[in-house]
Image (cartoon, grey):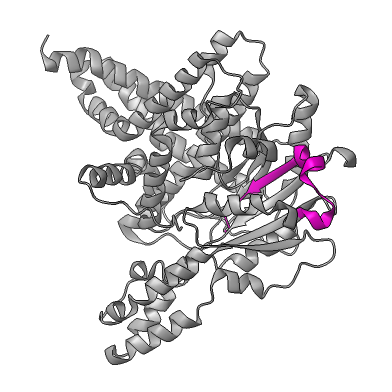
Amino acid sequence: MTTGGWWLGTAVPVLVLLLLARALWAAAAVELSARWLLTRPRCSMPRPIEVPWLVVLLPMLREQAVAEQAIAAFTALDYPHGQAAVVAITTEREDHARTTARTRLPQLAGKRQLSAAELHGLFPAARCQRVADLINAVPLHEKLDRLTRLFDAEPTTAQVIATLRQPGHGALPLVHLHQPAVGGRKAGQLNHAVEHLDQVLGPLGWNEAEHGDATYVIVYDADALPDARTLEAFATAAHEHRAAGGRWPALVQQQRLPLLARRPFPAGPLGLVLTEEWVYQLRRSLGIELARVRLYAWLSRSPLPEVLRMWLRPMVYGVGCGMAVHLPAVRTLGGFPEPMEDLGCGHRLSLLGADLTACPALVLDEPYTEPRGLTNLHALAFSASARPDRHAKAVIHQPGRLTAAARLLLMAREWADEAAWLLGAPLFAASVVSAWWAGPAWAVLAAAGVLLHGPLLTTRLLALAPALHAGLTPPEGTDPPRRIAPVSPASLIAASPIQPFIRLAGPWRLLWRRTAGRHYDFGKTER
């Protein structure tokens, strides 16, 4: 058989069937997850004696623009008095980065026209365009002085938080921790907070020896907006799991949805690409991240034989915006792992066969409105997921509930997922283009797969987005969140088949640079 004959006779039919199966699975997973969120019952808090201690962790790096809003929202969450606290964690890395960034000012001031992208890392992302406009409006010989004064006037996140008043009566207490310059990323800030829990909860009467087993640390992004009942929902989910299985779950995952509109998408083709990625992120949130947690939890309590559960059990992706981790589990893992605390936690707890469950309360965060942060995110996520064997090695000395075969199968599935990330879109595209020559039936199936995977699912997600957005009740005193409204839904639906290709840029750029022996600096994945 020739190569062409093998491609049309074997590869194309297999790929077309995989595309159709993947599209059907994605549509079903999105629909079931959305319905679960939209029909969730209101929280019924467990009895006070069973209410777990909760610590909300807000790691912040260059978050001056949103720090005050975030702290106001999280300290206003409903929860029994004296059982929870909010921790804002700033880092000396921000101060060191400012010192380095200041040396770039003369070079930037020498340009006739500054773009907002060139100011990323010097100012909060939300202010970059405004600063660029101000600098571009002055004569060239005055630009350095104006830019320097604006830069020096910009407070650090730590300075912003230091000026905030302690929340009023009835609100959750706020603790500000400042991490020294010890390297690392978000995980390092989280671990710094975990090391200082006595300072956070001690004033409320907490000590780890007595209360550690009923304590959760909950990780959020600083730009997130949680539902007012979020902490009650966490406590309820954890309590129900414990009542059913006799153990606190190691992880309770709240599903973040990228539906918070703070900045508009840019105009033109770039805006279309970023809006397509927003749709894909919403699909991933519902159809992969939440669906996997719910499937994993269902399998854990299912009467199915282990040999069958082993083949169905997914690798869970933790999401570091609404991720509650049981304090003993954090200790078991040796802290939050680098380079991505959420993927690392999800992978390692999955490989241990730990108890995981989902929380039905909503949390909204911002979509990416500029390409640099998006590319960094995809490269970092690929780097954190591509070696599940390293996660397995990190927890191999810990007692787990999975057999060696089950762990190997989970790792193999994750490797297959990463290979599909790199190669799936181009292979599926090639099979769709070739399907007519494989036979009219395969062409029809290929067209059905593309329509279901792209335009039809995108149409459904655009219809679900307003209902999901309306399902969030903001904390008291917080402005209602603005909803994302795509400029041209028709263009978004028509161009939806390009969505899987957008996610290729970050991983392939990372691999190219590493192959060439060049360092890849992920930077901050700013939106």
Vertically, is 333 above or below 475?
above
Q: Is residue 211 a member of the stretch shown in magenta?
A: yes
Can residue 347 be seen from the camera position used here?
Answer: yes
Name the residue located 84 percent from the left edge and 50 percent from the top edge: 80
- Residue 182 versus residue 422: which sits nearer the camera? 182
Q: Residue at 29% x, 31% y: name it.
A: 423
Asked whether the viewer can see residue 126, the reply is no
Quadrant of res 90: bottom right
Is residue 96 magenta-colored?
no
469 shown above or below 394: below
Q: In this view, does 226 lie above or below 105?
A: above
Residue at left offset 71%, top offset 50%: 55
Residues 275 and 113: in front is 113
Give whichever of 378, 103 is nearer the camera: 103
Spot occupied by residue 419 in the image (x, y as percentages of width and height): 33, 29
User: Who's the residue at 40% across and 37% down the image?
Assistant: 455
Q: What stretch is highlighted in magenta?
A: 201-222
447 horizontally vs 334: left or right:
left
